């Protein structure tokens, strides 16, 4: 996915929000893994 897609998905709640570390966006591996598992299971990812 491109960067714009990731941030659009974050804005809609369909992708986990990043954690800011020294001004850089980083994602928790566990949250990304959960998102991938949800995709594999046929859903569109975790919803808030």
Image (cartoon, rainbow, N blue to C red):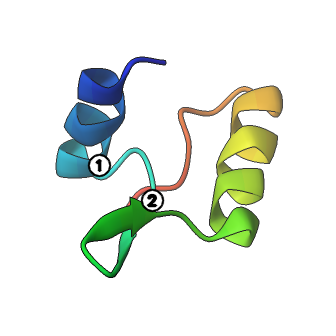
- Earlier in the chain: of badge 2 and badge 1, it is 1
Looking at the image, residue 23 lies above or below residue 9: below
- Label 2 residue SS: loop
Q: Is residue 26 visible?
A: yes
Q: Horizontally, is 34 left or right of 19 in the view?
A: right
Question: Residue pushed farthest front?
Answer: 22
Examine the rendering and report whether any part of residue 17 can be seen: no
Give x and y (percent) for residue 2: 39, 18
**In the depicted structure, whether residue 6 falls above or below residue 26:** above
Q: Residue at x 21, y 44 (%)?
A: 12
Percent position of residue 33, x then y: 77, 54
Label 1 element class:
helix
* Occupied quadrant, residue 9: top left
The alpha-carbon separation of the residues under discs 2 and 1 comes to 6 Å
Where on the picture, by quarter, is residue 28? bottom right
Task: Identify residue for label 2.
Answer: 16
x%, y% of residue 6? 36, 34
Decide if residue 28 is on the left or right side of residue 15: right
> How many numbered markers are drawn?
2
> Residue placed at 32% from the left, 81% from the top?
22
40 and 3: which one is in front?
A: 3
Q: Which residue is drawn at 81% across and 34% down?
A: 41
């Amino acid at each position: 996915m491109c960067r714009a897609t990731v941030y659009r998905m974050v804005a809609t709640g369909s992708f986990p929000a990043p954690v800011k570390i020294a001004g850089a966006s980083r994602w928790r591996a566990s949250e990304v893994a959960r998102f991938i598992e949800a995709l594999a299971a046929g859903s569109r990812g975790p919803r808030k």
